[in-house]
């Protein structure tokens, strides 16, 4: 990962009237805390990626290059870690994302083992499914996962599709990710409070919204023509249907309406050092989750930490909604 930079960025909207309204109504998000630092010891992280928040506010982190899942409480205290490098039950070869089910189970995408593993919240291994391939139930470098009451959804990245399974790994269905006939490249996926599935298509620079049965509802572009580079990865949706997207290359979080109107962004490049804690700014923001208290958590690849931000989604939800690119069939 390239070296990074920093400064606390205020909330800045990019669209005419929306910008004026946002400037008067929305304060800059505040960094409340960070946890994790580079290393392999207790509470340390090395290239953290996927995040999941349980109902108690605990945060599960896919600590990818330590080949483990690390768990922190809502105050950032390290509670537990499990996993080692390997291909056996409970071992990982780059865990990239994690999902927590209210029943007390944890699902992990094990990218280079091309499988999903299921655990209890204590870290006890339950089962695994998947192998490398293109058939139903097989994967090619999966990198995202989400779970609802009955289903597990996996972003099967190099097979350019989403697969849906039962909670015990039974294959149920699949559908392609792509834009206007071009094959896609699914990054993160998330479940909205209403059950819709949002997927970042990193090939098309789009956020695509599907029903749980794979019906494409809509899509909007997250490509900013003024930017020389952009690499979107993470996505999460709050209770007001506001969509948050992480931009790895530009070290920021972008905020959109459900219809794709850009409301603003926050964060600038900043690499943590003894003299610079980089509070409010980021280096390699990757995956996102919204905690039960409404705060936003961001994993930072090259700062090897998770940062928690305050937010005020009720203010954003009063902004004008943009026109949606309807793809409903």
Image (cartoon, rainbow, N blue to C red):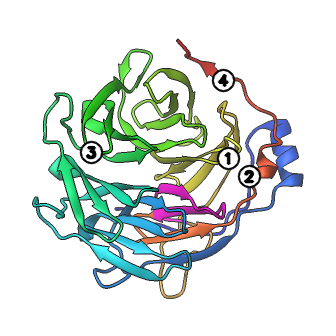
Question: Which residues are drawn in magenta?
Answer: 282-299
Q: Which residue is mark 1?
A: 239
Disc 2 crowd rating (10 Å Cα; few below 14, some 14-19, many 20+) is some
Residue at (19, 51) in percent of width and height: 128
Q: Which mark is residue 324?
A: 4
Residue ranking furthest to the top: 329
Q: Is residue 288 magenta?
A: yes
- Determine the CA span between mark 4 and mark 1: 19 Å
Badge 1 element: loop
Looking at marks 3 and 2 on the same chain, the residue that comes earlier in the sequence is marked by 3
Residue at (46, 30) in percent of width and height: 212
- Which of discs 4 and 1 lies nearer the camera? The answer is 1
Q: Position of residue 218 (x, y in %)?
A: 57, 24
- Determine the CA span between mark 3 and mark 1: 28 Å
Q: In the figure, is residue 197 to the left or right of 264? A: left
Q: Which mark is residue 180?
A: none
Looking at marks 3 and 1 on the same chain, the residue that comes earlier in the sequence is marked by 3
Residue at (23, 59) in percent of width and height: 94
Q: Position of residue 130 (x, y in %)?
A: 17, 42
Contact between marks 2 and 1 (CB within 8 A): the answer is yes
Q: Which residue is mark 2?
A: 313
Residue 84 position by quadrant: bottom left
């Amino acid at each position: 990962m390239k070296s990074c930079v920093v400064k606390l960025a205020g909330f800045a909207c990019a669209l005419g009237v929306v910008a004026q309204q946002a400037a008067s109504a929305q304060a800059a998000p505040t960094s409340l805390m960070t946890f994790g630092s580079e290393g392999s010891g207790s509470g340390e992280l090395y290239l953290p990626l996927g995040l999941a928040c349980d109902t108690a506010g605990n945060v599960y982190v896919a600590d990818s290059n330590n080949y483990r899942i690390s768990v922190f409480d809502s105050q950032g205290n390290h509670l537990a870690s499990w996993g080692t490098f390997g291909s056996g039950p409970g071992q990982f070869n780059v865990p990239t994302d994690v999902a927590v089910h209210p029943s007390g189970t944890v699902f992990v995408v094990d990218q280079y083992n091309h499988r999903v593993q299921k655990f209890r919240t204590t870290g006890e291994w339950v089962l695994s499914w998947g192998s490398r391939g293109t058939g139903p139930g097989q994967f090619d470098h999966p990198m995202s996962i989400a779970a609802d009451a009955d289903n597990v959804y996996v972003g099967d990245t190099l097979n350019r599709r989403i697969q849906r399974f039962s909670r015990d790994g039974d294959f149920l269905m699949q559908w392609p990710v792509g834009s206007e006939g071009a094959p896609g490249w699914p990054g993160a996926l998330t479940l909205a409070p209403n059950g819709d599935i949002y997927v970042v298509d990193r090939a098309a620079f789009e956020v695509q919204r599907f029903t749980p049965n794979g019906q494409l509802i809509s899509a909007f572009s997250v490509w900013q023509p003024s930017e020389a580079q952009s690499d979107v990865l993470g996505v999460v949706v709050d209770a007001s249907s506001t969509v948050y997207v992480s931009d790895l290359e530009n070290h920021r979080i972008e905020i959109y309406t459900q219809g794709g109107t850009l409301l603003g962004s926050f964060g600038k490049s900043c690499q943590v050092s003894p003299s610079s804690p980089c509070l409010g700014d980021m280096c390699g923001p990757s995956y996102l989750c919204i905690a039960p208290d409404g705060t936003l958590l961001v994993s930072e690849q090259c700062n090897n930490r998770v940062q928690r931000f305050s937010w005020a989604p009720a203010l954003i939800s009063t902004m004008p909604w943009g026109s949606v690119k309807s793809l409903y069939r």
